[in-house]
Amino acid sequence: MKVVGKIRQRLFRGYFRLRSNIHVHHWRGHGIHSPFMYSIVRNVFMKSRIVGADKHLYDILRHNGIEQKQAVKIQNLYTHCRMKGFLTIASGERLEHIAPDQLCILLPGVSLETIATIARQVSESHATLILLSPHRNARCWRFAQQIWRHYPCVSVDRRVMVLYFFSSKFQPQHYRI
């Protein structure tokens, strides 16, 4: 039984890896008509080095085992959007209050219950949420999809992370970049 599960998981991951490599619809911002998302693509996703002097979030992410490329993108997003604070959430943690200009980062291995609780809190406070490693299994991926379908937000699937921008100013859309 475990062998079938491992084979199924490898096929699932391989499918998404192939699909993300083939999908170049929004490459370098081509076809994105939202000025906000276009600036995110150009100033965050296309940068391979940290922009700005602040590296505090980058250091915390690297300490938690996040790859360098992902940590650079998240640090650049934090700097570009001028967010006022950030929270890194491991499994089992609870939050009391989330400010509107905060970035909430769910580390890999977070339980689905924690994801559901944090997603609800972040959507109510109109903050930004990042779910790292959403493709680690099919159940987690379906749950990541349910978030952008249930809560009005702009979501971005980067295969290694999904970003959710909860704001009443944006038209709800989903991008795969």
Image (tube, grey):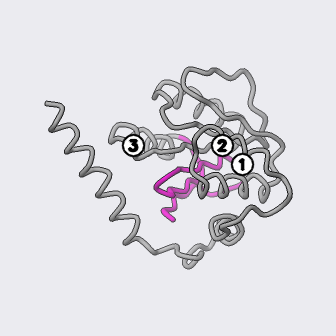
Q: Secondary structure at mark 1?
A: helix
Q: Residue 9's x, y, as percent?
A: 27, 44
Contact, mark 3 vs mark 2 (Cβ under 8 Å): no
Q: Residue 80 placed where, x, y %?
A: 78, 59
Residue 23 image point, x, y percent: 40, 70
- Residue sitting at x 32%, y 42%: 138
| Residue tagged 1 | 58
86 versus 17 height, above or below: above
Measured in 3D between alpha carbons, the distance from the residue under mark 3 to the one under mark 1, in whole angstroms, is: 22 Å
Crowdedness near tag 3: few (<14), some (14–19) or many (≥20) residues, C-alpha within 10 Å: some
Q: Is residue 158 above or below residue 92?
A: below
Q: Which residues are magenta?
A: 151-177
**Residue at mark 2:** 61
> Which sits in the foreground, 8 or 130?
8
For label 3, the residue is 136
Q: Nearer the viewer, residue 10 or 114?
A: 10
Disc 2, disc 1: CB below 8 Å? yes
Q: Disc 2 and disc 1: Cα gap in Å?
A: 5 Å
- Mark 3–mark 2 Cα distance, whole angstroms, equals 18 Å
The answer to which quarter of the image holds residue 118 is top right
The three-letter code of the residue at mark 3 reads: Arg
Question: Residue 168 colored magenta?
Answer: yes
Q: Is residue 137 above or below residue 109?
A: below
Q: Is residue 82 left or right of residue 32?
A: right
The amino acid type found where label 2 is placed reads Leu
Residue neighbourhood size for the residue with mark 1, other residues' Cα within 10 Å, grouped as few (<14), some (14–19), many (≥20): many
Looking at this view, is 72 or 117 the one in front? 72
**Residue 139: % across, % down:** 35, 37
Sequence-wise first label, 3 or 1 = 1
Q: Please identify, in this view, whether the residue under mark 3 or under mark 1 is nearer the observer.
A: 1
Please identify the quarter of the rendering in which residue 6 is found: top left
